[in-house]
Image: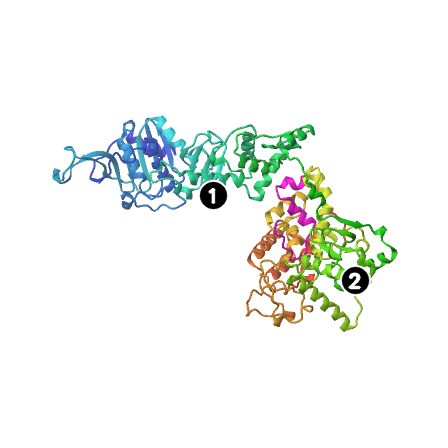
Amino acid sequence: MDDVVSADVADHHPAIAMPRSVDTLAYPISPEYVKSWIPVRALCELVANALDEDPAARIRWADGVLTIIDDGPGIPEEGLVLGYSTKNDAQIGQFGEGKKLACLVLARSPEIGPVRCDTVGYGFTPAVERRRLLDGLVPSRSTDGTEVLVYHLHRSDRTRGTVFTIACSEDLAGEAMSRFRVLSEPGYQPPQGHGVCVLTGRSGRVWIGGVLVSTMPGLLASYDLPLDAKGLQNRDRTVIEAGALRDTVRAILADSEDQQVIDRFARHVLGGGKLREPEQYFADIRLPRARAAWRTWARSHLPALTFFTTSGNEEAKLDLVDKGYTELTASGLPHEQLWAFMDRLGVEIARTRRVRHYEHTRDTTTWVPTRQLTAAERTVLDETQQLVRRAIGAFALDRVRVYSASDESPCSDGFYHPRTGDVAIHRDALASRHRARLVLLHEAAHRVAHRGGGRWLPVGDYQDRNRGFEEMLSDFAAVLLDYLAAGVALPELPEAPVAVSRAVRLTPADDPAVPAVRRELAHLLLDQLPHALTAGGFTDEKDLVASTGVHPDYWRTLTHPKVAGHRQQRGGRAWDYDKVALLAQAAGVHPPVVWLGYHLCEGPLYGRTRRRELPASVGDVRGCSCGMADYRAPGHDGNPSAEPHPAGHQRTPWTKKMRETTLRACADLQAIGGAYAEQIPALHALIDGQTTAVIGDDRWHAPARTLLAVERRRLRLEVTPT
């Protein structure tokens, strides 16, 4: 490079030789234009042009001369026209004015000596001169004429590239070159996405594509924005739009998982430091992995027992301090950012627990322990439970409790509690087998309508005097009539984990209403939990979940599974793949196995519209176990041209979101390889609609159940029967 520079500069040192002009090109631009530009800005424009044409451009100052050499195609005639530009988003320039304005600024500046440009076939030297038009016949405010920018053109024997030589001081040249990261950082690449946060060097600098465009005192870091953010600047590149810069800086920081970035901001804020508005980004941290990165930092740098407090928490604060907790403060943050900051660290606010009297006493029920029932009452209760569960399904009843009085349902012989899934029966109803059967069948209809089970999907209107509940109860009656008409005995119940007359309810991981694949996943996670706690150094299950930054509802849903088709209004869905992946990795389980284990059984239902009326073409509801009384048939969506299948089922692809996320899981399975990747064809057949998926018949869950079995073998866990 030095040889090339020496050859080009040889004729221009110590003073730049000015060639004989053979033509001129005058620009009617006032020298007062872009007064805000200083010589450094002009030099930067010429350096940027060279780097646009040749990323390996050579820029060097020696003996009072700054030389800028590129091996690009040269400056065509059109390049001398104001506003003409062929620049794209991958280049620094955009308006076609930079070179012209730079030459204007350099020509009028007393800090700059001669300026010369040599390019393919020609060259020019810029100057500011006074001109009169038509020999002074055009009226003018000055007898000396108007100053304009003039290019004195000359011929050149160059066949490639462009060379600018500018006489200037070393300090001026050094400052111009320092504004380009590519010149000071070997291997520099322009940022992608929102941009990058730069922690090295002086804080407050803002680059666009590695070119310094602004300095904002008070920022905690510097930021390099992508080249397509050039629109943030005004036309002469002297001002960057404040609102857009704020949004961009917040997006850069909110998406960052870099522990060094988190460390700088966390320590600064916990030390009482303030942040300028663009860097108050904590409420914008929403990506699961970015939130998990904050929890990782907190686990490594904060005491185990911490809290923060605001006005009104003084009593709780004293109590926590007495118990050995450490108070964290962030006095430099505004109130709303304080809450978000502490939440990202997993630090809870100090609270005083107060429970009002009516919350202790409302909906009180006087329960009757099983041991206080008479032998005849226990017999009626056990026989009736067994009868309902055999007729409808093992999921129809779980824990049945007996009461003698209740404020929750004072005018009935029983009630269903949707929060716990329990059914209650009044002790007086046990005096008659007929009455006991009526009550438990009625409450079982509430339970199944609310929770689903077998071939029935949950409905939103499961309370008394609602159509959903009435249809469920009528369907139960039809089931019983079918048994009566067929003259067959009720089916025997599968072996239950505990006795039918159990005093405690089944755990969700053992609930027969829940698809077997979800139960197997729950047992896998719970069996793996002790190993995960040891391997990760977690104190307990809550600590493991907190370390991921994922809401505890996700873990609770995976380990306390719901029936297929369950739609909880808030939480309880564990849908987001990234959040599930964070929990799976913390537990030491492959993420696609966990996601598919829970969500594959939702494939035909996810994204389908609900409906109330059952079309006559569907036929016998009991014979069709697709749940069409509550949802459109899988893949139906009102498409009459879809090819029908036996029992009213149709083979059409799953909805877009379910399909895309399942394909993402397949990509992760492919990366794992082996027995995991062998399930991909079966999964593709399901999402493409080539395999019929019937609610109530779980044979199509086979790919997910196989993955769970493979994962158990990998983790060396005992097989748990479902």
Q: Is mark 1 on a helix, strand or loop?
A: loop
Seen from the viewer's position, the closer of residues 232 and 29 is 232
Where residue 427 appears, as percent x and y from the top left, is: 80, 55
In terms of depth relative to the viewer, which is nearer, 237 or 391? Answer: 391
Residue type at mark 1: give it: Gln
| Magenta range | 543-570
Q: Label 2 sits on what residue type?
A: Arg
Give the quadrant of the N terminus.
top left
Q: In this view, does 284 lie to the left or right of 448?
A: left
**At x 44% / y 30%, what residue is drawn?**
217
Q: Residue 652 at x, y = what percent?
A: 58, 64
Contact flag, marks 1 and 2 (Cβ < 8 Å): no
Q: Looking at the rendering, which quadrant does residue 460 occupy?
A: bottom right
Cα distance, mark 1 to mark 2? 71 Å
Q: Can residue 255 be seen in this view?
A: no
Name the residue that disc number 2 marks.
435
Q: Position of residue 568 (x, y in %)?
A: 63, 52
- Horizontal relation, residue 125 to residue 190: left or right: left
The disc placed on residue 539 is none
Whether residue 73 is visible to the viewer of this picture, yes or no, is: yes
Q: Which mark is residue 192?
A: 1
In the depicted structure, whether residue 133 falls above or below residue 61: below
- Residue 337 among magenta residues: no
Q: In this image, 602 relative to 154: left or right?
A: right
Nearest to N terminus: mark 1 or mark 2: 1
Image height of 101 relative to 486, above or below: above
Q: Which of marks 1 and 2 is in front?
A: 2
Badge 2 marks a residue whose secondary structure is helix
From the viewer's perspective, is 381 left or right of 659? right
